[in-house]
Amino acid sequence: MRGEAIRHSSGTENFVWRELMPIDEYEGHKIRPGFFLQNGAVAVPGGVSFTIFSQNATSCSLALFEREAGEPYVIIPFPDNYRIGHVFSMIVFDLDIESFEYAFLVDGPYEPENGLIFNKTRYLLDPYAKAVTGQSKWGHRQGDGDVYKARVVTNGFDWANSKQPLIPMQDLIIYELHVRGFTRHNSSGVKHPGTFHGLMEKLPYLKELGVNAVELMPIFEFDECRDLREVDGVNLLDYWGYNPVCFFAPNTGYTAGIEYNQEGKELKTLIKTLNENGIEVFLDVVFNHTAEGDERGPYISFKGLDNNIYYMLTPDGRYYNFSGVGNTLNANHPVVQRMILDCLRYWVTEYRVDGFRFDLASILGRNEDGYPDTNPPLLKNLAHDPILANVKLIAEAWDAGGLYQVGSFPSWKRWSEWNGRYRDDIRRFLKGDAGLASIIAERIAGSHDLYDPVHRGSNASVNFITCHDGFTLYDLYSYNEKHNEANGWNNTDGENHNHSWNCGAEGETDNPEIMALRKRLVKNACAVLMASQGTPMFFAGDEFCNTQYGNNNAYCQDNEISWLDWGLLEKNRDVYDFFRKMIAMRKHYAVLRDSTGQAKCGFPYVSKHGLEPWKLSNDAETRYLGVMLAGKAEDGKDDQHDEIFYIGMNMHWKSQEAVLPTLPLGFEWRMAVNTALPVGKEIVEEPCDMMAAHLKLVFEPRSVVILMACKIQAKRRGEN
């Protein structure tokens, strides 16, 4: 036989035989050994190669089903010579990939105390499955109980000459969203609500808003009906999706139509379209646990293959639960590490994903005993992998087992972090807590007290005040306490320490003063976030005061609690316009994104100021802070100029007078932003109000002011 390289549409090459000849037959099905290095099911000339790993299995069989059938039409055992090492591989010929589904049956020892729980009667989902069956209709439980089957996926998507944006980390504005919740509400106005297609229909909105990266909450296949229950007549689902069934398969419940054997086409179209419009796509990935749970959980895939390899187990064979949901994936084992790396490479090469946010990423750095590893091999390999070289890696640097690594997550100058301390400190300061001015200056300056640029680079901090987990930005200033009663746990779930303030009334109110104050606080938060060094991120809907009615843990609410109410966009158009203009300002002025370039004026790149310039009081009652950013920006190839901004924040309930820093000769301060100005006039898009080079300024209660240094025009100097 002769061999040749077959080039797939993705651009990858796989070596296959020109003529694949069967050498065995089982119940009328012609077979031969498959491609041992090709995990999962791969269509090859004349058939399909099925490959699966199990270290402790004694035998393995392939079960083939008619589409949507509950029982297989044939079960083909892997002959002994179809196994090399711990890998089983077999080609089955003459299969119509559009007419069948498949699963595996694996036998081996049953020794729970040693972590081995093989059961040859249970159908197992292929860990490398590219599509999972029975999940396409959102909210409908599949009919086969715990039986998950896979389909073969053909890769015929044409990326043409599409290029990824490759936006530098400091230039990103990340917009976190839930694919279904973003457009599911009737007010969204899209033709395909709750889907990838529906999200693509909102492209004009995303471009107008100005965000250039969308971070999608989990889109790996998960079973939203796994924990189906009813509370007060409402069906509650696993809405968020932090419970993966399969890492390689997109959630087909998010598609506008069924994509038999072409699963992922709609998602690829979305990514391609967003990329072509200058918007990167990040995936929120969950490699810390799976949907199989603990001893009481379902038996889907990994438990029946090598339970003691894929999961972190105690000495008596039980599950470590650093994830808080039953099990913990064993990222210490080379097989698991390879699977995670294969998975990320797959999403980058086949879907052109631009970045990943790792849920509870600290788990991935725990060693076999559960303690944090000082040099975790998985995290290091991801940081240095050549395929992932241009991909953003963002860690949620904590886990449910109490490990908190914000500022200390292993990085190799490649990993960024969700800066949880930025969130907590900024929340406290913006609602009026005293004694935080000095630490807030650190947060706005890039949190270099946490992320030493020498060891972490200049892009380690992803700044956020809100995300999917917790209050929305509007609710942060509408509720003193969480209101999760609708979740059915007697309001015991969700975070209790929210650093929120209801502005004088719990929940909705018709008091105009309270409503106006809430909007001002939302705008304050936006202004500070967009003027902070680091990468800003905010949760979809914050830009028009979307509410979850005080629910700070809406993981199970597939309804109006979680869905974005687009009717609020018109109601709160002034807030949306403020976000849009602040985003545009951040994009326009380099110093707001990165002030580390040395300014020619001699000012430090960041400085702290109190009511007197260059003097920041450590008084416990201090509620005023001024932060000055100074850096250089490029007008052209060789033309550079200084950019100087002053962010003044008065979080006191009384006005305060502050003296501004003296500018270099020939410059004066001009007002760019003042959240105390009348609605709609808070941002001066063309700052023109000239002020003296050195003066006192009154900062209104609970307001943020941004001033920029501008050259004094010749005529103006003559008048002075």
Image (cartoon, rainbow, N blue to C red):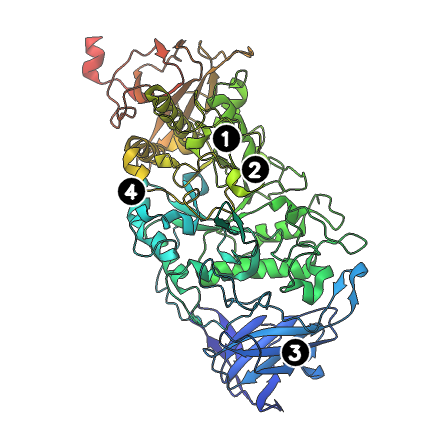
- Viewer-side label of 3, 2: 2
Residue 539 seen in the figure = yes
What residue does disc 3 label?
61
Q: Amino acid at mark 3?
A: Ser
- Where disc 1 sits, the SS reads loop
How many numbered tags mark residues here? 4
- Viewer-side label of 3, 4: 3
What residue does disc 2 label?
494
Q: Which mark is residue 446?
A: 1
For the N terminus, the quadrant is bottom right
Q: Please tell me which residue is depicted at 48% across the width and 27% down the height of the picture.
A: 444
Packing grade of label 1 (10 A; few <14, some 14-19, many >=20) is many
- Please tell me which residue lies in front, 146 or 182: 146
| Residue 234 % position (x, y) | 47, 48
Distance between the Cα atoms at labels 1 and 2?
29 Å
Q: Amino acid at mark 4?
A: Glu
